[in-house]
Amino acid sequence: MLMTSQEEQKSPARDDGHFFKTGFPAMVSALVRNSWAEPFMLARRLFGERAEQALEPVARAIGGLVGVMARPAFAAFRTTGEHVLEDTLKATRIAENATGIYGRDYYVTPKKIVRRIHTCPYRDREGARILCHIGEAAGQELFAELVPGVRHKVLVTMARGHDFCEYSYELD
């Protein structure tokens, strides 16, 4: 379920930083943004949903592997008092900001965070739906390794015709 306007108004929020917007990180971001997505979008244009179905298991395997490998680094940099789901957001911000995707995180409850994306360079690109699909699949496995018990759900996306993307991260 999408975040309600009441939840949005009452929740502390954090905008993405600017690390990938200037200097050398901006050059890396431009390279990544203009290269990684093209083969996936081409596959979506050529093969439709079959491309998403074929690539989902690969994305899940990669997400899980990255999660296992990244867990010690995220644990080492965790600070006292961080939200229990903060590692999921750090991973999301790194991946998204490096590809030109920016948003805001809403800390709804001690066990729920909602992320809303307002800037996506792929939003109007033909075939972009596959990026959302494989990103969600990889993310679910990655986040499960970083924060066991997390449920990650992509609720709406710009590539599917909405004004923004919104996902939730929740613990039972």
Image (cartoon, helix red, strand yellow):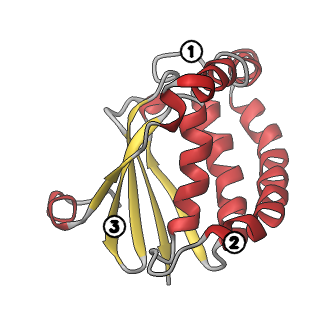
Asked where in the image residue 17 lies, by quadrant, the reply is top left
Q: Give the quadrant of the N terminus.
A: bottom left
Residue 92 percent across, percent down from the top left: 57, 50
* Local secondary structure at mark 1: loop
Q: Is residue 166 left or right of residue 147?
A: left
What's the CA distance linking mark 3 and mark 2? 22 Å
Q: Earlier in the sequence, mark 2 or mark 1?
A: 2
Callout 1 environment at 10 Å: few (<14), some (14 to 19), or many (20+)? Answer: few
The answer to whether 28 is drawn above or below residue 85 in the figure is: above
* Mark number, residue 70: none
* Mark number, residue 126: 1
- The residue indicated by pointer 2 is 76
Q: Earlier in the sequence, mark 3 or mark 1?
A: 3
Q: The residue under label 2 is which amino acid type?
A: Ala
Q: The residue under label 1 is which amino acid type?
A: Glu
Q: Is residue 1 left or right of residue 5?
A: right
Can you tell which of label 3 and label 2 is closer to the viewer?
Answer: 2
The answer to whether 56 is drawn above or below residue 89 in the figure is: above
Q: The residue under label 3 is which amino acid type?
A: Tyr
- The residue indicated by pointer 3 is 107
